[in-house]
Amino acid sequence: MLQILKVATTSVLYFLSYLIPVKKNIWVFGSWFGERYSDNTRYLYEYIKENEEFIEVIWITHSNEIREEIIRNGGKAYLINSFMGYWSCSRAKYALLSTGIYDVTWYALGTTKKVQLWHGYPTKKVCFDHIKSSKYNSYLLNSLKKFRDRIFPTSCSTDIAFVSSDYAKKIRMSSFRLKYDQVFVDGTPRADIINGHLSSEYITNLKSKHTNEKIIAYFPTHRGEGEGNLNVIEFLNLVKLNEYLKMNSIIFLMKMHFYHSDTTINQKLSNIIFLEPEIDINFTLPSVDLLITDYSSVFWDFLSLDKPMIFAPFDLDEYLLEDRSFHGDYLSFTPGPKVYNYEQLIKELDKWRDGLDEYKIERANSIRDHHNYIDDLNRKRITDRLKKRARINLN
C-alpha cells in the first residue's frame, strides 16, 4: 500500500511540474542516484559555479552530509525529496546527470531538459542497449509500472548527451534512443581534470614522498553493481608482488569501484597503497606511469595521456555471461597486453621496465578514434553549447 501511495504521489507531482515556469539560468546537478558528489556532473557544477556569474547552479542529493559540505563551500544544494529540491528541479532549464533521472528529483522534470554526461566512456552496453526487466510481486504494482513507463520518464530518459568522439556518439544515440542532433561531441568534464594534469593534495604529498619511484595504478571495475563475486585481487599475489615492487622502486596504487568500497587488504605492504574511497582517481591518473585495469572505462580516460596499459580480464567469460556485454570485441579494442595470472603480469611489467612499448601505434589509433579533443576545454564547450541552446548570452 505504501508503494502504491508513493507512485500515486510522485505521479501527481510530475504532472504539476509542467505548470511551473522554467528559468533558463537555473541548472540542477546530481550524481549516482543522489548518493554521491562526484564525477562529470561535479566537475561541470564546480566549473560553472566559478566561471558563470549569471547561471544559478544547484546540487540535488539524498545526502544531508553532501548538502552541508556544498553549502560550507559556498554552493547551493537541496535534498531530493524536499520542497526546495522539487521546486528547483521543476524550475530548472537543465538537469545534468551522471547516471539517470534518479540523480535528481525526477518527478519535478516535466519541462526540464535532461542532459546526460554519464560516468564513463561507452564501452559496456547500458540503458536501452542493456535493459533487465524488473517485476513486483503484486499484479497491481506491475500493471501500474507498465502504465507509468508509457507516460512518465524512465531512468534512461534523456534529451541531450555529450561525448568525446564520433564513435561514442553513435553508441549514445543507440543507448538513449537519441537523434543525431541530440548528441554533441564536445568532450567530457573529467577530461579537463586529466588532460589539465590537475592533482589533489593527496597525490601531491604521495609524489613528494616517493620522488624516485614509478607509479602503477590498479583500478578494476565492479561486478554486478556490487552484488557480484569480486576476486580481482586474488590473482595479484600481493606478498610476492610487493617484493617485486620494492626491488624495482615502484609504488602500486589500488582502488576498488565504490560499489566494493568495503573491500580491504589485511596485510601491511610497503609498496602497495590501498586508496580510500574518497580519493578521486581522475586527479590521480596524470601522475600514473602505468595503468592496470579489467573492464573499467577508466582506460579510455587514461588513454588520452598516451601511457602504457595492461589489461587483466581473468574472468572475461564469466563477466560477459553474468554482468555486461560490450560494444565491440574486448580483446580487440583494448590497446595493451592481456594477462590472466601473476606470472603473466610480472612478464609484462618487466617489458615495461625495460622500455618496451609494443602497443604505442595501437594506442595512437585509439586516441585518434575515441578522443576528438585532447585539451582542458571540455567544460567550456559543454557550457557554451547549453547556454546557446538556452539563449543565454555567451559574452
Image (spheres, grey):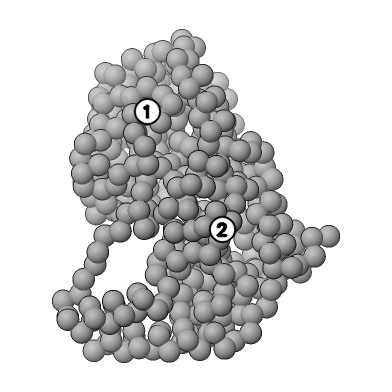
Earlier sequence position, callout 1 versus callout 2: 2
Is residue 102 depicted above or below 178 in this figure? Answer: below
Residue 70, image x, y percentages: 59, 66
Residue at position x 48%, y 75% from top? 105
Q: Check the picture and name the quadrant holding the C terminus.
A: bottom right
* The quadrant where residue 48 appears: bottom right
Mark 1 or mark 2: which is in front? 2
- Left-right relation of 61 to 208: left
Residue at position x 30%, y 58% from top? 131
Q: Give amino acid for label 1.
A: Ser
SS at mark 1 in the image = helix
SS at mark 2 in the image = helix
- Left-right relation of 91 to 317: right
Q: Check the picture and name the quadrant holding the N terminus.
A: bottom left
User: Which residue is identified by label 1?
Assistant: 332
Is residue 69 depicted above or below 9 in this figure? Answer: above
Is residue 177 depicted above or below 265 in this figure? Answer: below
Whether residue 210 can be seen here: no
Q: Give amino acid for label 2.
A: Gln
Residue at position x 17%, y 81% from top? 139
Residue 373, image x, y percentages: 63, 38
Residue at position x 40%, y 30% from top? 334
Q: Residues within 10 Å of mark 1 (few under 14, many from 20)?
A: few
Residue 132, image x, y percentages: 26, 60
